Amino acid sequence: HIKETGKNNYQFFNAGIDHYLQRKLAVEKQLRSAIENDELTLYYQPQLDLQTMKVAGVEALIRWDNKELGTVSPAEFIPIAEETNLIKTLGEWVLTEACRQNKQWQNAGFNKIKVAVNISIKQFNEADFVDTVAKVLAATNLEATYLELEITEGIAISDPQIAINKLHQLKELGVTISIDDFGTGYSSLSYLQKYPIDLIKIDQSFLKGILTNKENTAIVVTILSMAQHLNLDVIAEGVETESEFQYLLSTSCNLAQGYYIGHPQSADEIQKEFNKSFKKLQTRELNL
Ligand code: C2E
Ligand code: MG
Ligand code: MG
Ligand code: MG
């Protein structure tokens, strides 16, 4: 390729790589001190129970504000944390903070809800991951039923049997397990039977144009029907419009999450939603 494209393109290509590596190194360097410098916070996005129309849970989403780099998206820094082994410390911080916050909400008298924490593949694959979860629950005094772990289909790539064993140990602790971004992985559906999971999160890409895009409608309908047969709960991610929401209300989908229901917000902001009911939305006219 280098020969074909000539000298100028080669230099351009080189500069591109250079820029990319420099950014990566800068992110890594700043990330190393982010926890001790108090630069990380968790935002929380509501998950609405479509039967009760109340907030049943919140997903914890990490936010990072750095004095040199500004706001860095988790989509950028989580993969870097995974590559550099920073994910272990970072992941433990997220787990602890999410459980601590949920316990604090309970102590303040709000309806008890679940907090869902994203677990990266490398974090899940750490030999002491189950111990870490048990340790965090004990330290924060949160009952395991109020913790949900969001994993992705990729956890089983290296060794499916180890992954299954670990999931069983987590289930024994009493935590809820969900499969995030469901439908985007490449693993076979058979793992749904083998894994002790509770919930699948339909990836937000399938919600787009759910009323007009026949392929997406077919995918969502199929996932919902499969989940019913396997006795799994389903949460739809990325619900952005009223019509998407109304569509879900007409299905067996259990929970919904997305900008239409609520954006990720600070702990102080989100707690204002906890004892509210979303009933008003349900009675609105269907406006397709
Ligand atoms: P995810 O777990 O699939 O989280 C959903 C992402 O979609 C979040 O982006 C959320 O802000 C965004 N989102 C929510 N509702 C809508 C919607 O209606 N429309 C659209 N277009 N987007 C919506 P965010 O916060 O930037 O996080 C991106 C990804 O970074 C997450 O995807 C997750 O994989 C990862 N991540 C975030 N926080 C953590 C964490 O604490 N630990 C780990 N390991 N990964 C995390
Ligand atoms: Mg998630
Ligand atoms: Mg997701
Ligand atoms: Mg994602």
Image (cartoon, rainbow, N blue to C red):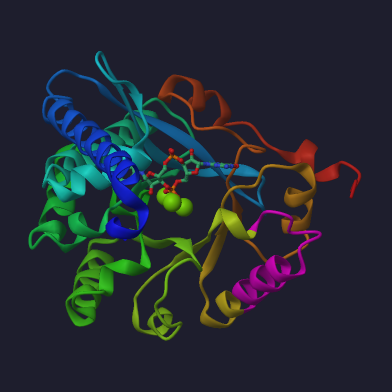
Residue at (36%, 62%) from the top-left corner? 152
Residue 131, position in %: x, y?
A: 10, 56
- Magenta stretch: give its range: 207-225
Taking 185 as reference, is 72 left or right?
A: left
Residue sticking out furthest to the top: 67
Residue at (58%, 79%) from the top-left corner? 226
**For residue 185: magenta?**
no
Taking 251 as reference, is 8 above or below it?
above
Residue 134, position in %: x, y?
A: 16, 53
Taking 152 as reference, is 88 above or below it?
above
Residue in the foreground of this view, choosing between 141 and 36: 36
Taking 98 as reference, is 249 left or right?
A: right
Locate residue 25: give its quadrant. Answer: top left
Give the dominant element type of the magenta stretch: helix, strand or loop. helix
Residue 250, position in %: x, y?
A: 78, 61
Residue at (18%, 28%) from the top-left corner? 26
Residue 7, position in %: x, y?
A: 29, 45
Quadrant of ligand 1 in image: top left
Which quadrant, please, contains the N terminus? bottom left
Residue at (19%, 43%) from the top-left corner? 81
Residue in the foreground of this view, choosing between 232 and 112: 232
What is the number of callouts on the image? 0
Res. 146 visible in picture = yes
**For residue 219: magenta?**
yes
Residue in the foreground of this view, choosing between 75 and 5: 5
Res. 141 visible in picture = no
